[in-house]
Each structure stands twice: as C-alpha cells, then as structure tokens.
Image (tube, rainbow, N blue to C red):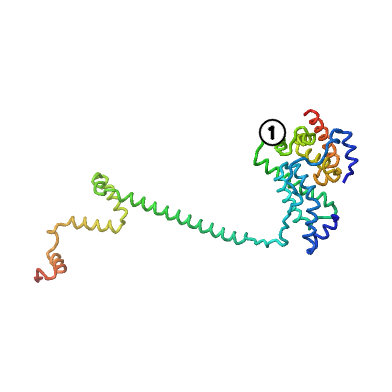
Amino acid sequence: MDNKENIEDELASIAPLLKTIDRTPVQFLPTAYFEQFNMVIPPLERAPIIKMQPRFNWIRYATAAVVVGVLVMGAFLYTNNSTMAFEDNKYGKIDFASEINQLSDEDLQTYLSSVDVLTGAGQQAITNDIDFVNDITIEQIPDEELLKYLNENTEKPIYKKTS
Amino acid sequence: MEDKEIITQFNQAATKNNAYTVLVKKYQEKLYWHIRRIVLSHDDANDVLQNTFIKIWNGLASFKENSQLYTWLYRIATNESLSFIDQQKRKSAVPLDEVAEVLSNQIKADTNFDANKLEWKLQLAIQQLPEKQRLVFGLRYFDEMTYDEMSKILDTSAGALKASYHHAAKKIEEFIKNN
C-alpha cells in the first residue's frame, strides 16, 4: 500500500481542502455490527451434479415423435373422411328420376349410342342378330324348323313329326 | 496472521475453517466500507459483503499467490458491488440525469446525516461523480491504495487512474466550496 504521506502530499497539491476532512466513516452502522458479523461457512463438499440432459433429450424426442405421428394420422384420416363424405353428399342428394325426365330424346340417343360403343363388339353382334331376326316373318320359317324349335323348348312335344 | 499463512492454512482441510474465520475478521471492515461507498445503504452492503465472502470461500483454493490477497479480495468485492448496482439500475430504470440526485437523497436519508458537517458534504460531492471516478477516488482517498494496486483491481492503467483521481479530487473540492 502507498504510504499515507505520499497521498497527503498529492492531495495538498490538487485539492488541499480534502486533506483537512476527517475520513472516519460517518454513515449509520448498527451497534457492534462487525463484532456480531457471522459469516456462515459453506459446506466443505458440494453435492454431486447429476446430468439429466441425455435422459431428458430421449424423452423429448420420443414425445415429439408421438405427437408428430398423431398429427399425421389425424390429418390423413380427416382428409380421407371429408373426401368420402363429400362424395356421398354429392351423389346422395341427386334425384335421378327427375334428372332423367329432364333429358331430351336426343340426349338419350346420344348417350345410348355412346354406351353401344363402350360395350364393345360382342354387344354389337347381339344387336345385329336381333335386328336380323326381326326382319324375318314367321311365315318365312319352314314348319319343320318351327316344330323342331318347339320340341326342343317345351317339356312335352306339341306336334308329332309326320313323315 | 499474515495473508500467506492464511492461504496456506486454508489449503489444509484441518485448518481451513479457522483460516477462513481469520480472513473474515481481518478484512470484513475494510471490505464493508468499500462496498458501502458503492451501494450506499447498510442492508445492501451487508448482502453484498456476504456474497463477497462466499465468492472468496469458493475461490481461495485456486488463488494464485503471484498477486496480493488484499487486492484480490477488493477485486471480488468491487465486482460484486458493481453487479449489485447494475441489477438495481435495471429494476429502477432511473434516467441518467437523475442518478446523482437519487444517490444524494440516499445519503441524506441516513439517520446520522448533518448537512453542515464537512464529512457529509464530502459524501454528497462524491455522488456527483461518474461511477468509475467514485470508485477510483474511494480506493485512493479512503483505502490509501497505490495506483498499481488499484490497477490490479480495476483493470485500468496506473496513469489513467492517476488522471481520474486528480480530476475527481478537484471536482469534489469545487462542489464542497460551492455548497
């Protein structure tokens, strides 16, 4: 520590008034404060510090995974259900009878012709056969053919073959 | 007991508590007044002194003897006091231009305050200084430290501290003469 004389000489040169002031503390201090000041000695050994970080991380990541899973599943199911419900509502509310009544003959003809196309060559062949049959009158069919047909398609023969 | 002996005994388990008690008794008064000059109120000074001695207990085993124990203790006390002041500033949010007035009011609130006494005028004058100058002035004027010792406590060059001290002393004298 610097000796007091040096400090006093310095003060005398820069601020002589300060040299004359008593430096004993004047502030309030409780009676016998320093005599009664007791510093509690902290415990010698510190309690060991247990790191919780790894376990905490594991739980945190597991929780995050579960939450994300629930959210994804929830979003998936919600989206799917709402689409299905939308489709159900869309067609469930249609009055098909009135809708068909509103169609014109031309529209129906157009639709049926498109169905013919969609049903393919087999359907076309059947239609053609029917048209062919419709063109033949019953008078043009020989009696033998008619009898043969009736005998084949009834339980009891109606006519006996005369030969 | 000399400082070196205190440190030696503190580093031995059998004499550790006794060495610490001796250290507290030896330095409590000096450190208390150093802290009190910074934080002003007795209750705050008492709290900061307790924290200071806890820090000393925790750090004394690793204290390097290439510096003086005396300056090391003052450094801890100074840091604790300044941390406390910073916390108080954040809580109160007093505007900068009102800080000196708030500090003066704290001085005047002391039960022993006497506006006619030169010692109290000195206390009021010190509160008009910036924080760093208050610290420098207190360490030199009241604790009679050398500039080298102060340099170790405040991490400032001895030349800068000397200039700061001279500046502070002149301002204080001017304030006392005008009030």
Is residue A56 left or right of B26 when viewed as pictured?
Answer: left
B90 to A15, vertically: above or below: below
Give above or below for A145 relative to B125. Answer: below
Q: Give the residue at the far top of this rendering.
A: B178
Q: Which residue is mark 1?
A: B98
Quadrant placement of the C terminus of chain B: top right
Dot 1 falls on a residue whose secondary structure is helix
Quarter where residue B124 is shown: top right
Image coordinates for residue A113, horizontal then vertical, percent: 28, 50
| Near-viewer residue (A135 or A86) | A86
Location of residue A73 in the rendering, given as x and y in whole percent from the top left corner: 46, 57
Residue at left 13%, top 59%?
A138
Q: Quadrant of residue B86?
A: top right
Which residue sits at x=72%, y=51%? B50
Comparing B133 with B51, the one in front is B51
| Quadrant where the image shows the N terminus of chain B | bottom right
Residue B115 % position (x, y): 75, 33
In the image: residue A27, left or right of residue A156: right
Q: Chain of mark 1?
A: B
* Neighbourhood count class around disc 1 (C-alpha, 10 Å): few under 14, some 14–19, many 20 upward: few
Please identify the quarter of the rendering in which residue B91 is found.
top right
Does residue A153 appear left or right of residue B99 in this picture? Answer: left
State the residue at coordinates (75%, 56%).
B57
Q: Is residue B84 above or below residue B13?
A: above
The amino acid pointed to by label 1 is Glu
In this view, the residue in front, A153 or B64, is B64
Residue B62 is situated, as x and y percent measured from the top left of the image, at: 79, 57
